[in-house]
Image (cartoon, grey):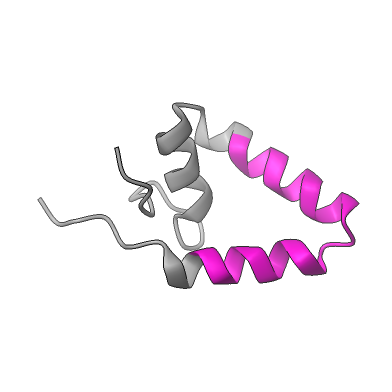
Amino acid sequence: MALVRSRNRIIAGVCGGIAEWLGWSPTTVRILYVLVSVLSAAFPGIIVYLILWMVMPSPSRR
């Protein structure tokens, strides 16, 4: 399974796509991502999210 953005999206589908790729709950991944971002002074987390948004492909239309 390839790492792609999810259709189950709140902002861009990045956390949803990571959750689908790992087989985890999207809510769990979102909470963990926010916690890691806040604990790392938030700025690096925002930059990583924006980079992933640009790099991860959109889900293919079926």
Would you place residue 20 above or below residue 14 in this image? above
Q: Quadrant of the N terminus?
A: top left
Would you place residue 36 above or below residue 26 in this image? below
The image quadrant that residue 41 belongs to is bottom right
**Residue 31, image x, y percentages:** 69, 40
Q: What residue sits 51% from the left and 62% below the top?
A: 11
Q: What residue sits 73% from the left and 61% below the top?
A: 45
The reply to whether the magenta stretch includes residue 43 is: yes
The image quadrant that residue 20 belongs to is top left
Would you place residue 61 above or below residue 50 in this image? above
Compared across the picture, whether 46 is left or right of 37 comes to left
Q: Of all residues shown, which one is farthest toward the left?
A: 62
The reply to whether the magenta stretch includes residue 32 is: yes
Q: Across the whole image, how many numbered discs are drawn on residues? A: 0
Q: Nearer the viewer, residue 61 or 52?
A: 52
**Residue 14, image x, y percentages:** 49, 55
Compared across the picture, whether 3 is left or right of 37 comes to left
Q: What residue sits 56% from the left and 70% below the top?
A: 51
Q: What residue sits 38% from the left and 54% below the top?
A: 5
First to last magenta residue range: 29-52
> Which secondary structure is most common in the magenta stretch?
helix
Q: Nearer the viewer, residue 40 or 62?
A: 40
Q: Nearer the viewer, residue 55 or 58?
A: 55
Would you place residue 9 above or below residue 45 in this image? above
